[in-house]
Amino acid sequence: MQSGLILLFVYNIDRGNLSAMADYQKSSIPGKSPPCNLYALIFSPVGMKKGWKRFINDLGIPSRFLYRDEFFLETGTEKQSYPAVYLQSGKLVQEMITADEINHLDSVDSLILLVTQRLIHYKK
């Protein structure tokens, strides 16, 4: 990978552990879609899923997880739909995976595959 790149995973929820946990709990109600499919895919009620955590640690590119309000404060990038995945290089922030794409995923394995496929374009 090119050095200086950072993956930014942006949740469709605002920061604050209580807010995040409340949103996650709402997502587990049968018949109700989660407020953030990214969060629902990578977290279980006891924390980040082991397969996802291993994937991120072995990826070879730093990753950050931000709530939508944190993302806006840090980058000034305003977007209407989250979750999303961005690639940051210095001050340049480029959307790599859209909300629509994430919201159509049904497993953490499908998210891992999508991230891997998109990162191929950024290899040296």
Image: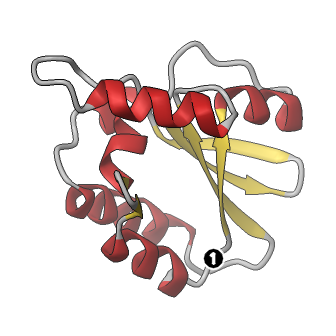
Give the percent coordinates (x, y) of residue 42. Answer: 37, 55
**Horizontal side of residue 38 vs 89, given as left or right:** left
User: What SS does tag 1 mark?
Assistant: loop
Q: Residue at x 32, y 64 (%)?
A: 112
Q: Which of the 4 quarters of the picture holds residue 53?
A: bottom left
Give the percent coordinates (x, y) of residue 17. Answer: 63, 40
Residue 3 to residue 96: above or below: below
* Observer-nearest of 55 and 79: 55
Label 1: how many residues lie within 10 Å, few (<14), some (14-19) or many (20+)? Answer: some
Q: Which residue is mark 1?
A: 61
Q: Kindly tell me whether residue 69 is visible in this rendering.
A: yes
Rendered-image quadrant of the N terminus: bottom right
Q: Residue furthest top?
A: 80
Amino acid type, residue under disc 1 in the picture: Ile
**Horizontal side of residue 25 vs 78, given as left or right:** left
Give the percent coordinates (x, y) of residue 119. Answer: 48, 66
* Observer-nearest of 28 and 75: 28
